[in-house]
Image (cartoon, helix red, strand yellow):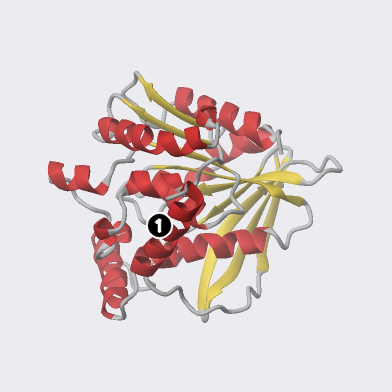
């Protein structure tokens, strides 16, 4: 089977097991607040992802230069901290990831995923409740023949829909980056949304079968019945080719060998397009998976590819 036929068949099979997406609803976006500081603008925005379901995000904007800005969709980690969410990319600190990106000339869109930040249950009384609430979100959808992952992917695309309403942003230079939960979402979102041109995923990446073999825990968002009958993570990666993607991990990441397997098994799809150089894999020798060296590598990767479009 020709690769293009294979990927289309795979995409249809994956879409089927993910279940139906939520019903569309108008964005009805609004800016809830604006802060101008340190040479950039931070907007607190909300927009409707499905009927009566609102997402919240920070949009960080560098000073205008007369040209449309490249956009980085920045997805937060899980990190057993549902309260943090989008604030991971902006805490008002000098080494914030969002601030680093803005200083490089990127606009940064950092939303809360469902169940995190401003999208936690209103009655939440702490992290234990938040974890149970996420299982509730999964159970609701499984009973309807849907999945929580489909909902999260849908919400990503709605965030991009909102970004494309902003005239200061370049629709042809959209990147996605994340760590852990955000890294896994970089793969899933790029596989199913062709508007994302460049991706970065740091730590926490492995094939489902490898995770099962090791007896590791699964995050509820990634529980998809029958998925392994049609695909594993390296298959999902092939749906991204030939768009540039950086996979990275550290020696402290229990998934480092799993990340290497995903890279090796996805590489032939890139080679088919003569684009092996567009898929890269790095292991950093450090104990802190949020360290500055991986972040610097990610920033260089984004710059090298976004400027080519």
Residue matched to label 1: 10
Residue extending farthest to the right is: 66
Q: Is 87 drawn above or below residue 119 in the view shown?
A: above
Between 246 and 220, the residue placed more toward the observer is 246
Q: Position of residue 218 (x, y in %)?
A: 23, 53
Q: Residue at x 79, y 46 (%)?
A: 68
Determine the image quadrant of residue 238: top left
Between 304 and 125, the residue placed more toward the observer is 304
The local secondary structure at tag 1 comes to helix
Residue extending farthest to the top is: 285
Tell how many labels.
1
Task: Look at the image and tell me in which quarter the C terminus lies.
Answer: top right
Q: Position of residue 87 (x, y in %)?
A: 49, 49
Q: Position of residue 256 (x, y in %)?
A: 29, 31
Horizontal side of 70 relative to 53 (left or right) equals right
Q: Is residue 158 visible?
A: yes
Number of residues whose C-alpha sits closer than 10 Å to that of mark 1, classed few (under 14), some (14–19) or many (20 or more)? some
Horizontal side of 174 relative to 120 (left or right) equals right
Q: Residue at x 40, y 50 (%)?
A: 236
Horizontal side of 150 relative to 251 (left or right) equals right
Determine the image quadrant of residue 141: bottom left
Q: Is residue 113 visible?
A: no
Q: Position of residue 186 (x, y in %)?
A: 46, 47
Q: Residue at x 34, y 18 (%)?
A: 285
Residue extending farthest to the front is: 1
Q: Is 53 drawn above or below residue 263 in the view shown?
A: below
Q: Residue at x 26, y 79 (%)?
A: 143
Horizontal side of 298 relative to 303 (left or right) equals left
């Amino acid at each position: 089977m020709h690769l293009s036929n294979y990927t289309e068949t795979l995409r249809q099979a994956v879409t089927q097991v993910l279940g139906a997406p939520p019903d569309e609803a108008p964005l009805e976006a609004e800016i809830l607040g604006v802060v101008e500081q340190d040479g950039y603008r931070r907007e607190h925005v909300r927009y409707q992802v499905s009927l009566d379901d609102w997402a919240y995000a920070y949009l960080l904007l560098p000073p205008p230069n007369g040209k449309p800005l490249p956009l980085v969709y920045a997805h937060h980690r899980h990190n057993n901290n549902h309260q943090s969410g989008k604030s991971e990319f902006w805490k008002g600190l000098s080494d914030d990831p969002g601030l680093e990106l803005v200083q490089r000339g990127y606009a940064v869109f950092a939303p809360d995923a469902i169940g995190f930040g401003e999208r936690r249950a209103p009655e939440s009384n702490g992290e234990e409740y938040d974890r149970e609430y996420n299982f509730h979100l999964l159970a609701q959808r499984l009973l309807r023949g849907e999945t929580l992952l489909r909902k999260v992917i849908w919400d990503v695309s709605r965030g991009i829909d909102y970004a494309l309403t902003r005239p200061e942003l370049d629709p042809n230079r959209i990147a996605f980056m994340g760590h852990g939960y955000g890294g896994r979402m970089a793969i899933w979102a790029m596989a199913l949304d062709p508007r994302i041109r460049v991706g970065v995923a740091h730590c926490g990446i492995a094939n489902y079968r490898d995770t099962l073999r090791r007896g590791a825990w699964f995050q509820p968002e990634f529980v998809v019945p029958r998925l392994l009958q049609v695909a594993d993570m390296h298959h999902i990666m092939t749906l991204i080719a030939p768009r540039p993607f950086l996979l990275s991990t550290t020696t402290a990441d229990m998934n480092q060998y799993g990340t290497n397997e995903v890279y090796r098994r996805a590489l032939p799809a890139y080679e088919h397009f003569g684009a092996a150089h567009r898929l890269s894999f790095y292991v950093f020798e450090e104990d802190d998976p949020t360290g500055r060296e991986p972040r610097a590598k990610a920033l260089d990767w984004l710059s090298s590819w976004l400027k080519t479009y």
